[in-house]
Image: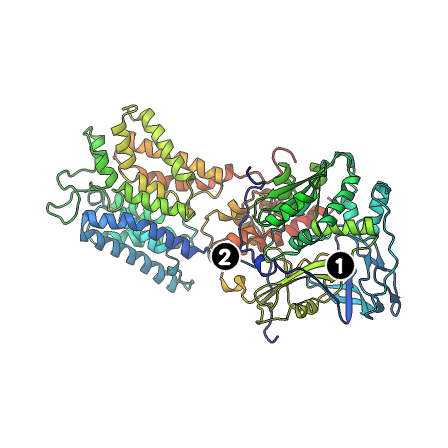
Amino acid sequence: MGLLTFKGGVHPYDGKELSKEKPIQAVLPKGELVYPLSQHIGAPAKPVVEKGERVLVGQKIAEAGGFVSAPIHASVSGTVKTIEPRLTTSGAMVNAIVIENDDQYETVEYHPAESLEALTKEEILKRIQEGGVVGMGGAGFPTHVKLSPKEPDKIEYVLVNGAECEPYLTSDYRRILEEPEKVVGGLKCMLKLFDNAQGFICIEDNKPDCIKKMEEMVKNESRIQVKPLQTKYPQGAERCLINATTGREINSSMLPADAGCVVDNIDTVVAIYKSVMLGQPLMHRIVTVTGNAIANPCNFSVCTGTSMECLIEEAGGLKETPKKVIAGGPMMGMTLFHLNVPTVKTSGAILCLTNDDVSEQPETACINCGRCVSACPERLLPSRLATFANHNQLDMFEAYDGVECVECGCCSYICPAKRPLTQSIRSMRKIALANRKKPK
Amino acid sequence: MNELLHVSSSPHVRSKVNTSNIMLMVVIALMPATIFGIINFGPKALLLVLISVATCVLSEGVYEHFMHKPVTVRDYSAVITGLLLALNLPVGVPWWMPIIGGVFAIIIVKQLFGGLGQNFMNPALAGRCFLLISFTGLMTDFSVEKGAWGLVDTVSGATPLAAVKAGESVDVMRMFLGNTQGTIGETSVIAILIGAIFLLAVKVIDLRIPLTYIVTFLVFIILFGGHGFDLEFIGAHLCGGGLMLGAWFMATDYVTTPITKKGQIVYGIILGILTGLFRIFGGSAEGVSYAIIFSNLLIPIIERFTRPTAFGKGGKK
């Protein structure tokens, strides 16, 4: 059987061997923890605690600022030190609640569900919303919104995204190996919401042990299947994943629900399980700390709010001076200029590299080779779009469907002339999207 | 940490393939044809190749130096132009011929339009056609001196394709191997194919353009060649002239091909039809060079009409 896949894509060096074999280790944070109020798509959360107040593990410290928003919970016990703007991974200063850890880990009382059967759909959604669950693959879209489409009966597929196509990342890999029952449990919660849906657990074939493990876990589940995927970047991008597993296509003006799909990443599904079944809010996530500058690459279970500097120290520190530190994977992650930024719900990895491919290879002239066109999973003409962007030709950029770009980075990666295609397209796309939102 | 961290927009990794190593692959792929040409036609061929490559590299370097542009001779693109130009010359031309052709190709066709990536037609072929028009006699004299060092059959003075056009019979096997008259690099189909297979294997080119070109041309000559399905005639047309060198090495030049996949197929079909037209109905036996540079000019139009539909936009909005 041919493996499921999409058209286009690239095969970057995956670097997963650095941290693949390292079991998940819990890291206890020291000092202060920082919780930016905006670590999801949508309205920022509103603080419900005051300076000087003592909080417990699992206590809600900020409530959702609207329907498309998510509450934030403390991951340690301690006192609220301050609420002030702090530097985040994106480089922006964002209002954040700062908590001084008292190392007591005194916990609020959780309210586990008796059984999934006993919960109504509304209760499940409520628990997910209250648990502050957001898409942990990177976008941070509030999960309860995603799971409340207009017509839940039309959802035919619930896809669990275990592709982990970003190089270097191994957090989903470890999660599937170590806690497969939670993944299946979370998926069951989601399937309960959609009566007509099939559950697919999608895993790239570079993780055969995960595929095997999952297949064993679900062999008695009539509504769940494991879908092995071809290893290729960006297999885990939402549109590519939907295309690979169901053959359906969506564009920038559609939601996965329009194609009858709901996609959530492995960590998110586990967070759903924890909030629905155990009553625990989202306050931990797995972070891969890796790269050739890290002494001892690791997979950590991290309290949100822990500073990235602290995680690097936990991983044995730096064995060489890094040139580049990236929050996330090398294809779509954001570079950091300062390491004292907090881990948030969407931080999947910290990658420290001793070399910087981008500055080492100067840009040269486009030779029209068409590699970007072959690699583009959105079937665009990246080299043309980048030229339109550089010439500020918004009309041409839109005519050539520039807004369809998902900024996966394949074109920049593959370009033999080393042109920063994704960067040019991204900046123009921002303008185009802003114009789209303006009332006409 | 004393050193500052680098920041940039994602992605933060780049593939190892760069322009220079792609171009170097093409140079390597041209070696079998070049070496065969030198063995076939003798030391004069080597001299022409060297002069041509040196001219192209020098004119590129000197122009860029005086125009205060970054000197890009290290990307091997000028080497390829020089090689292809030499491979498209008959061995009997005087030594100054590749100098004129090389300067024209690099300065007029490539640099004046903006350098690498901006030339609107293949520089080597534009150089060749320029010489062909300016020095028709010298450029179409394929006779080789008797007793010349080399494998080439010195008995007949005409190229096999001209012989076919004149209604004579030719030895197709000989054309496949290459010890016949022609330009330095075009005679040996086998040497060209070895290079082409290498380029396919290292994924510098794909089959889309060469295959549609050759197949379209085949269909054209079967339909309009006047010989129907005559194997000798078809074989001679396939192996003769610059078809193989053109289809595998010059029609696939990145800069002068459409960037869209559909466009590449359209381009291949147009090339096949034009080559057929020029060869069967034109005045000269050969038509590949003109077909390619003419099709080069059609690329903007081809691209406009073959733009791919964005993912998820098939038909509906």
Query: Can residue A307 be seen here?
Result: yes
Q: Position of residue A126 (x, y in %)?
A: 85, 47
Q: Is residue B191 above or below residue A89?
A: above
Considering the numbered disc 2 on the image, is that residue within a helix, a strand or a loop?
Answer: loop
Disc 1 is attached to a residue of which chain?
A
The residue where tag 1 is placed is A284
Most extreme residue toward the bottom, as rendered? Answer: B2
Q: Which mark is residue B53?
A: none
Position of A128 with respect to B175 (left or right) is right
Name the one closer to the observer, A280 or B102.
A280
The residue where tag 2 is placed is A418
Alpha carbons under labels 1 and 2: distance apart? 38 Å
Q: Is residue A416 above or below residue A218?
A: below
Measuring 75% from the left and 61% from the top, which residue is drawn there? Answer: A304
Q: Is residue A171 above or below residue A262?
A: below
Q: Amino acid at mark 2?
A: Lys
Quadrant in which the N terminus of chain B appears = bottom right
Q: Position of residue B199 (x, y in %)?
A: 38, 47
Considering the numbered disc 1 on the image, is that residue within a helix, a strand or a loop?
Answer: strand
Q: Amino acid at mark 1?
A: His
Q: Nearer the viewer, mark 1 or mark 2?
A: 1
* Other residues around mark 2 within 10 Å, as few (<14) / some (14–19) / many (≥20): many
* Other residues around mark 1 within 10 Å, as few (<14) / some (14–19) / many (≥20): many
Q: How many marks?
A: 2
